[in-house]
Image (tube, rainbow, N blue to C red):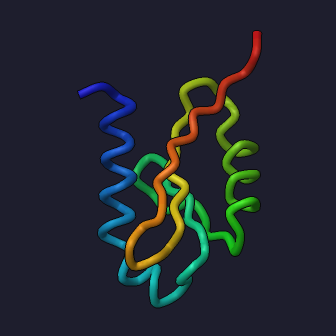
Amino acid sequence: MKRDDAEFQLNLEVFRTRLPKLLDESKDQYVIIASGEIVQVFETYEAALSFGYRSFPSDGAQYLLQKIAPIPERADIHMACRAA
C-alpha cells in the first residue's frame, strides 16, 4: 500500500471511529483529520477548505475534510501543490 493510500485509510478510520461523538458535538459541521488526528472542526466547508490549504501547503500534504453527518456525503483528499 502506498503512503498516500495508507494515510487516507488511517484518516478515514479515525473519522469512522469518532463519528458518534462528532455527531453529538458537531453535527453538520466539517472536520479536518490529518496524520490520524482530528485537527479542527469548522462550521462551513469553505472555512475548513481555506484552513486546509493554509495549514497543509507543501506538496504531498494530505488531509481528510469531511462533513459530520450520519451518512457521509463526501470524502475529499486534498493534496496541496505549489507551482515551481
Taking the image as shown, residue 84 lies to the left or right of residue 10, namely right
Taking the image as shown, residue 73 lies to the left or right of residue 31, namely left
| Along the line of sight, the residue nearer the viewer: 16 or 35 | 16
Q: Residue 79 appears at what percent x and percent y?
A: 57, 33
| Along the line of sight, the residue nearer the viewer: 38 or 82 | 82
Q: Relative to 42, is 8 above or below? A: above
Question: Who's the residue at 67% across and 70% down the image?
Answer: 42
Question: Who's the residue at 53% across and 67% down the image?
Answer: 67
| Along the line of sight, the residue nearer the viewer: 39 or 73 | 73
Q: Residue 12 appears at what percent x and percent y?
A: 36, 55
| Along the line of sight, the residue nearer the viewer: 11 or 37 | 11
Residue found at the very far bottom of the displayed protein: 24
Taking the image as shown, residue 1 lies to the left or right of residue 49, namely left
Q: How many marks?
A: 0
Q: Residue 73 appears at what percent x and percent y?
A: 47, 65
Q: Relative to 51, is 18 above or below? A: below
Q: Relative to 5, is 17 above or below? A: below
Taking the image as shown, residue 4 lies to the left or right of residue 42, namely left
- The picture quadrant where one finds residue 83 is top right
Question: Who's the residue at 44% across and 46% down the image?
Answer: 35
Residue found at the very far left of the displayed protein: 1
Quadrant assignment for the N terminus:
top left
